[in-house]
Image: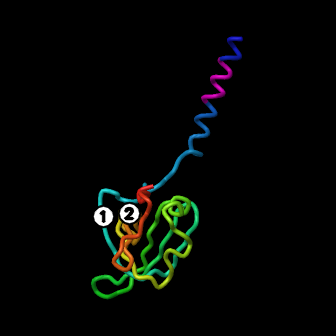
């Protein structure tokens, strides 16, 4: 009986250790959430897909040169509960994205706020998920 209990506990421990990566979630780990930046531009692509919604846009830098930016949001499931659909944003829309910049320095951010037509677009409280 005691051997069975020890074997069961060891098996359970091994199972928990091996299943850890299955529960991991990267979220906003690639972004510096202690900083905030904003960019304004024209949406070129809107992907309402799992695991995270992606927004690509053209942004003019201070010299007028076009830069390709990408913003990442929480899951479409979460945004759908806030009223989003796959047509909430579309190519050609002018928006301002505000969020945490990529730690790598690439033109990418984790979006915490979107402004379109002077109005904030609700993220459903999930901007940091």
Residue drawn 64% across the image and 34% down it: 15
Q: Mark 1–mark 2 contact, CB under 8 Å? A: yes
**Observer-nearest residue: 106 or 121?**
121
Q: Nearer the viewer, mark 1 or mark 2?
A: 2
Residue drawn 44% across the image and 57% down it: 126
Q: Secondary structure at mark 2?
A: strand
Location of residue 29 (image quadrant)? bottom left
Q: By what rule are the colours in the image chosen?
A: rainbow
Is residue 11 located in the magenta-colored stretch of the structure? yes
Is residue 10 located in the magenta-colored stretch of the structure? yes
Location of residue 105 (image quadrant)? bottom left
Q: Horizontal placement of 34 versus 73: left or right?
A: left
Residue 112 is situated, as x and y percent measured from the top left of the image, at 38, 63
Residue for badge 1: 36
Location of residue 63 (image quadrant)? bottom left
Q: CA distance from mark 1 to mark 2?
A: 9 Å
Q: Main secondary structure of the magenta part?
A: helix
Residue for badge 2: 112
Q: Horizontal placement of 80 versus 64: left or right?
A: right
Q: Going from the N terminus, do you reach mark 1 or mark 2 first?
A: 1
Q: How busy is the neighbourhood of tag 1: few (under 14 within 10 Å), some, or many (20 plus)?
A: some
**Observer-nearest residue: 73 or 106?**
73
Q: Secondary structure at mark 1?
A: loop
Residue 42 is situated, as x and y percent measured from the top left of the image, at 42, 83
Q: How busy is the neighbourhood of tag 2: few (under 14 within 10 Å), some, or many (20 plus)?
A: many
Chain part drawn in magenta: 6-13
């Amino acid at each position: 009986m005691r051997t069975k209990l020890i074997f069961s506990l060891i098996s359970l421990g091994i199972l928990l250790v091996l299943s850890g990566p299955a529960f991991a979630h990267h979220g906003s780990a690639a972004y510096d959430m202690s900083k905030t930046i904003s960019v304004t531009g024209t949406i070129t692509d809107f992907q309402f897909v799992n695991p995270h919604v992606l927004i690509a846009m053209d942004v003019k830098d201070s010299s007028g040169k076009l830069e390709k930016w990408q913003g990442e949001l929480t899951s479409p499931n979460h945004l759908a509960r806030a009223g989003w659909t796959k047509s909430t944003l579309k190519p050609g829309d002018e928006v301002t994205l505000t969020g945490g910049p990529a730690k790598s320095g690439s033109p990418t951010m984790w979006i915490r706020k979107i402004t379109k037509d002077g109005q904030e677009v609700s993220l459903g409280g999930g901007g940091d998920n």
